[in-house]
Amino acid sequence: MKTSAAASGLGSTLRAAAARTAYGAGAAAALAGVVAGYGLWERNQFGLRHETLPLLPPGAAPFRVLHLSDIHMVPGQELKRRWLHSLAELRPDLVVNTGDNLSHREAVPDLLEALAPLMTFPGVFVPGSNCYFAPRPKNPLRYLKGPSGPPANHPAFELPWREMHRAFGAAGWANLTNKAISIPFPGLRLDFSGVDDPHLGRDRFAGWPRGSSTSREAPHLRIALAHAPYQRVLDYLADAGADLILAGHTHGGQVCLPGYGALVSNCDLPTWRARGLSVWEHGGHQVPLNVSAGIGTSRFAPVRIACRPEAVLLTLTPRS
C-alpha cells in the first residue's frame, strides 16, 4: 500500500510539473507571437527626425538636407512607397542617399517610382552592400556575436545596381562612390567626398575637390558620405577635415530594448551611436556624425522593435 501511494504521489508531481512546463512553453510562444506581430507593425511606422546644425558661414540662408538610408525596397511595399512620395512635400535643398536601397532583385522599378518625386531635387548618393548583393536568410542571433559578414560575391546574388545608378544619374543625382565633387548653391559651395561601402572593404577616400586657386576663399562646407560607419572610416574622414559625416547601415539596432537602446550596430560603432546625431572625435578634430536608423529591413528579418524607421531632415544654419 505504501509503495502504491508513493508511486501515485510521484505520478501526480510529474503531471503537475509537465503541466507547468507546457503552460510556460505556451506562454513563451504567445509572448513571442505578440512581439513578432508588434515588430511587423512597427516596421511601417515611418517617421521624420529633425536636426539643426549651425555649420554655415555667418549670413548664409538655412539649407535643408534630407538624409535617406537603408530603404531595402521589396516589390509591393505600398506603405513605404506612399511615405517616400510624401517626403517631397518637404522641398529639401538636397537629398542624400547613403545606400542599401534594395532587398529584392525585382525591386528597382518600385524603388525608382517611390523616389521619383524626390529625384526632382538635387541629390548625391553612395552604395551599400544591399545595393550590390541580395540579402540571404540568417540566424538573427549571429548579429550578437559581431558584425555580419559581407554578402556572397556571386552572380546569383548580384542585384541590378547598375540600372539603379544609371537612373539616379539620369535624374541628376551625383554618384560619390570613391569620388569627390563640388556642387554650387546660391551663396554656398558644398564639397562632397563619398566612399564605397566600408562593410565590403571597398572604401577608398578620394580627398576633397580641388576647385580653383581661390576656391577656398568662397563660403563652402565639406560633407562626407559612407554607408557603414566603421570607426576607421570616421577617423580618416575627421582627420581630412570633414564638417559633417552622414551614414546609415546600423538600422538603429533594428531590435532595441526600451530604456536601453540598440543591442548591436552591425559594425564596430558603439551601440549608443547606432542612431542619431553625435560628435565624432579623432586627432583633435570634432565632426558632427548623423547615423540614420534607416527606412527598411532585410526581407528575411522584416521587424523593428523600439526602433521605428526614419528619414532625417537636417537644417543647416549659420554659425553664431
Image (cartoon, rainbow, N blue to C red):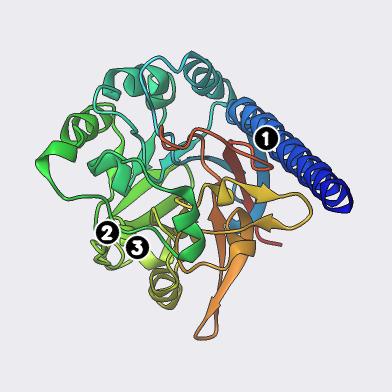
- Mark 2 Cα shell of 10 Å, populated few (<14), some (14-19), many (≥20): some
Q: Rate crowding at label 3 as few (under 14), some (14 to 19) or many (20 or more) other CA atoms within 10 Å.
A: few
Image position of 311 (left or right of 183): right
For the residue pair 189 and 72, the one nearer the viewer reads as: 72
Tell me the CA gap for discs 3 and 2. 34 Å
Residue 317 horizontal/vertical position (percent): 64, 50
Could you tell me which residue is drawn at 83 percent across and 52 percent down? 3
128 to 22, vertically: above or below: below
Looking at the rendered image, the disc whose residue lies closer to the viewer, 1 or 2, is 1
The type of residue carrying mark 2 is Leu
- Could you say which is closer to the camera, residue 270 or residue 208? 270
Task: Tell which residue pokes out farthest to the bottom in this image.
Answer: 283
Say which label, 3 or 1, has the lower sequence index.
1
Q: Between residues 16 and 116, which one lies in front from this camera angle?
A: 16
On the image, numbered disc 2 is attached to which residue? 200
Choose the circle earlier in sequence order: 1 or 2. 1
The image shows residue 177 at horizontal and vertical percentages of 25, 52
Which residue in the structure is indicated by mark 3? 215
Tell me the element at label 3. helix
Question: Which quadrant is the C terminus positioned in?
Answer: bottom right
Q: Distance of mark 1 from mark 2, alpha carbons?
A: 32 Å
Q: Which amino acid, by three-letter code, is at mark 3?
A: Ser
Could you tell me residue 51's position as x and y percent? 67, 47
**Tag 1: residue type?**
Val
- The residue at which mark 1 appears reads as 35
* Residue 97 x/y as whole percent: 41, 41
